[in-house]
Amino acid sequence: MSPVHPLDEAATARAVIAGNGTLIHWSEGARRLLGYTAEEVEGRPAADLLAPGATVPRPASGGGRADGVLELRHRDGRTLSVWVLAHALEPAGDWLVLTPLEARGPRDPEDPLTGAVLAQAPCALAVYDERLRLYGVNDAMAEVIGLPEERIRGLRVSEIGSRPAGERVEREMAEVLASGRARAVETYARAGGEDRAHHWLARIAPLKDTHGRVIGVCVAAHDFTEQFRARERLQLVNEASVRIGTTLDVTRTAQELTEVCVPALADFVSVDLLDPPENGGEYRVGPPPAPVTLRRAAHLSVNPGTPEAVVTPGETDVYPVSSPQADSLTAGRPLVTPNASGTLEEWLTWDGRRGGHVREYGVHSTMSVPVRARGRTLGVVVLSRFRRPDPFTADDVLLAEEVTARAAVCIDNARRYSRERQTALALQRSLLPQSLPRTAALEAASRYLPAARAGVGGDWFDVIPLSGMRVAMVVGDVIGNGIQASATMGRLRTAVRTLADIDLAPDELLTHLDDLVVRLSAEAGAEGTTGEVGATCLYAVYDPVSRRCTLASAGHPPPVVQPPEGPPRQIDVAPGPALGVGGLPYESVELDLDEGTVLALYTDGLLESRHRDVAAGLQLFCRALQESSRDLEEAAHAILQALLPAGGAPDDVALLLARTQGLAASDVATWRIPADPALVAPIRKQVSDQLEVWGLTAATFTAELVVSELVTNAIRYGEPPIRLRLIHDSETLICEVSDSSHTAPHLRRAKTFDEGGRGLLLVAQLTQRWGSRHTPDGKTIWAELSLLGEE
């Protein structure tokens, strides 16, 4: 029999029908079927070939194919029932209609093609009877099993192959035999005569007789090892993108890399990194010179405790030229060593301990992958296999490169974040008070904690001594984080100290500070940034003489007060707008505080938490303060322990605790001064007598001169009533002269023959510091004398 040409068009009747129903193509097979030539039908409506009453099959909804039986007219007038198959031809909208001309009858069992189906099919097939005993296999399945059919016929799957995999397949076969429904199962087993296992997909189908009774099962085995590995590699890359880089911590990121690779890619993985350059510099662009010193960041093994490791995390080790670490870094690409004990003999001989571990655990394949990000070398990852029998392949190298590249970017991001965080933290700590001043007005304790994961923010606190033994307390929070927030915090803290030095009231101080933040926002916007600069602030002034505290808030959480007797409570302070809003007023509130009252100022990071609301946080705060307020340092520690999670605060936290102290009435002396220069001498005598009562006679001469000059200046240039007040503690004597004039005094250089103009200059020379402050009734000029120097 002559062979049939593969493109024998005459064996199929074909016609192409245009979208308007016109026949545009008629094949030789179509002529054989209906007798019409192409010249007779092309260009005519296809409907002319239908017998009267014929029904045209319609395609399924949304489908491009239709089939059915058509009643067609033959050229000689006969009607033929023909099964046709139609395909839509996109995008022209035409249809291809065809039907086979050489339909075959029932297959002959002796047909060589029929006999070759089971024996020579490339898919491994096996047939089992109703007892799940092997009935027959084709050549492909016999090759997979590795045994001839005549030897294994009559055995069960669990008796032919490995027991775990065979028993699982046999259980699935029994389910198919009982239910009559096909199913698929994935298994991992060795083929006959091979030393490594394959991933198999076994499709199990029931075999039924003519009555539908299940009489056996057919098992078709497909080796999908490559597809499985490709899927595994894709899963590993996806897992790496999800699991690596969850934190901005270099060590944790390196550990996540090892967790992704073990055991999916290797049995032991180590990550060794170069130490960062000094002074916050960048890593070199080219490879580091060998020998190279690396620090172990993380490692992981399939064996508990990682006994294969020679270096512990945090330690450094030197790797010579012959080591895979140094060679890979020098080459700038991954290097695979098929036999660690054979090809690395020089290095392993030099490092006897490492060589012993290689031989002990049977390491047979090693891969070194440089850790590179943004063109710079950060370290190297070494992957080893000893439990898995197969060596690293080219696909494994590509996979390791992909995973390491993702990890390298995360490590570099963490490194850059850590460097910026350390810089911002150093800047912020340099801008915060290194210690709190000792004052007669209060005892203070403070805490500052940067955020555990976010960038360093702009929280700050301060205690500022003021004139008249008064003291200012301030807590603030700049919006944002990083170096910019720290720098803004430093500018605001400096501004607060400057404004406090001129003794502005709390509401006036916040108004000036708001103007500054508005200007900072304008400057930031002019530099091309968003221009968004904002902050909150609480400013309080405490006077130990009157035991009165004045507070004002710019959008800051209200402070908590713990009286000597009774429970703690929040102070009702008008919140006011946050700094940077501009144009809105602030209000002050005054309250009397008993001596020994604890005032707690804090930023919002202390109370806010994802696990509780602010009200619950405030209750914890008050409870911790009440239980430990006897010692402020212990109280600060207890408050942080009660409110912050073990892993650190999610936001910056600043806390300032202050216990108020009062000056005894016997430590303050006040006189009303008539506006008569002739009475200055008696005033000096009264001051001298009072200092003798206080036991401060060593300061009498200086105090008399200062009082004389300040009183004379008030009588000459001020307005009555005039008041003189002396205040003292163990270290300082303060002289204050108040009058009703709002004109502030100033130093000036007196000419040689001027009679006046030297008073304030003399006061400035004799005292530790001096100044003036405005009051609701005028002004007060004050001067401080150090009693320590007098002693």
Image (tube, rainbow, N blue to C red):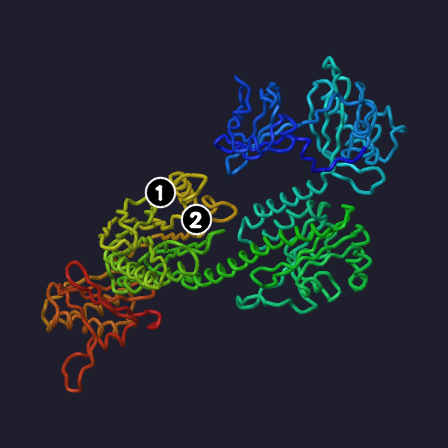
Asked if residue 423 lies left or right of residue 604, the reply is: right
Q: Which mark is residue 516?
A: none
Pointer 1: residues within 10 angstroms few (<14), some, or many (20+)? many
Pointer 2: residues within 10 angstroms few (<14), some, or many (20+)? some
**Marker count (numbered):** 2
Query: Residue at left 43%, top 39%?
Result: 612
Q: Is residue 215 above or below residue 456?
A: above
Q: Which residue is mark 1?
A: 568
Q: Is residue 528 above or below residue 658?
A: below
Q: Nearer the viewer, residue 543 or 673?
A: 543
Q: Which quadrant is the N terminus positioned in?
A: top right
Query: How far apart are the two marked residues, 2 and 1, measured between alpha carbons?
Result: 13 Å
Q: Which residue is mark 2?
A: 635
**Which amino acid, by three-letter code, is at mark 1?**
Pro
**Which amino acid, by three-letter code, is at mark 2?**
Ala
Q: Where is residue 646 drawn, in percent x and y? A: 52, 46
Query: Residue at left 41%, top 60%?
Result: 486
Q: Which quadrant is the C terminus positioned in?
A: bottom left
Q: Is residue 627 above or below residue 295?
A: above
